[in-house]
Image (tube, grey):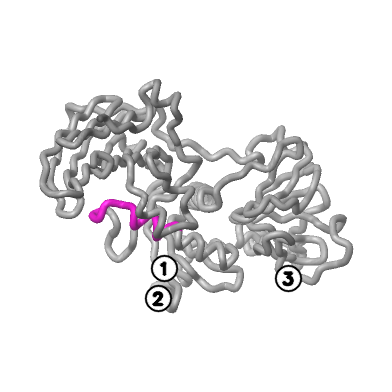
Amino acid sequence: MAAETRVFLEVRRRLQSALLIVGEPSRGSMSVDVSVMPTLLRVENPAGCVEIQLPAEMRLVPSSCGGLCHVAGDGLHLRLRAHTESQVSPKLISMFNQSSKAQECCTFYCQSCGEVIIRDRKLLRVLPLPGENWGALVEEWCCHLDPFANKPLHPLENDCFIGDSFFLVNLRSDLKQEPKANTKVICKRCKVMLGETMSSETTKFYMTEIIIQASDRSFPFIPRSQFVQSVTAQCLVELSSTRSTFRFTIQGQDGKVYILLWLLNSDSLVIESLRSSECIRKFPLLEDTLKVDSSSALNAVKVLYQPCIKSRNEKLVSSWESDLSVHSLTLPSATCLELLLILSRSNAALPLSLRQMNSFQVSHHSRSTKYEPTKKDYQKGKGTKVCK
């Protein structure tokens, strides 16, 4: 009974503020006592209580509690100040962010099944690709004939070029025969689309389908939905930072738009109490994002989204595609549908009053591995526990 009393806390690191929602008991009308302490939240009713130990880097300010109100279907809402050690959200760490890693031998794996795609490739150069309109800019800069005209950027054997949502590598030495351009690259084991060939030498691998690991390390198993969320969130955050764009179209490799995304913020920390297991039966493919008898404290980006499948929102899609401030991200079509399912699941898990903003749906997108408390954490007073 106590575990069914939902506690939802969203902290904005930059604003140093927090929204606390204490859900209504699922059975009848019962009194609820809520205690807010700097490092602990406690919700108690006659059936028991739920305690949430906050992460070590965060502190609440109990004296700042205000705006208490009751929202039908949600429960009690209140706002308060929160102090975090860092006002900037933690960045995801890619192996390519570390210069020393670029000289190591790397192995490319299929993220879905662990099949080796490229074994022991020594990458001497790992370079970011220029923006999509770089050719037009070169024409403006050059007072003579464009030296790059009709010369697309292709990686050499020991190169890896990084795009918005893909890697470009040279597979000439790995293939027995020359592939045709614009053909799909399929995993031999699980038949998932990993990328596509751009020429006889250059292959594009999508970041959502490939894990690149130093060859002296084993394949890291990461739940699929968690990996897709993390990679997508990283792409959104980096593009919003480097190009000052916050609206995105998510389209398949066939050019069809599946999702419209609007990035609201990237500094959220979301904490939830224990949850029932009903959602797991509804979304069996996403069981790794919601576990029974566990709490979660995750760094997340907050997005607005609109699904565009089955000819939905055609006028809005047309408007966004003609807007120069909107950036397009291309992923395999199956991954676009997977991402839409993840967004829908996240939206359905939010309190009712937080699920919509104007005509858009709201979702929290995990940026990194979720905090799952262990037995040692409980002994140290961390995580969530149900008091008897």
Q: CB atoms at circles 1 and 2 under 8 Å apart?
A: yes
Residue 169 position by quadrant:
bottom right
Residue 307 - label? 1
Q: CA distance from mark 1 to mark 2?
A: 7 Å
Where does label 2 land, which residue? 312
243, 46: nearer the viewer: 46
What label sits on residue 321 in the rendered view?
none
In front: 107, or 273? 273
Residue 343 belongs to the span the image colors magenta = yes
The quadrant of the image that shows the C terminus is top left
The three-letter code of the residue at mark 1 reads Pro
Q: Quadrant of the N terminus?
A: top left
For label 3, the residue is 183
Q: Residue at x 48, y 44 (%)?
A: 367
Give x and y (percent) for residue 253.
61, 69
What is the CA distance from the residue labelled 3 to the residue labelled 1? 27 Å
Image coordinates for residue 332, horizontal then vertical, percent = 60, 65
Q: Is residue 207 left or right of residue 62?
A: right
Mark 3 residue type = Thr
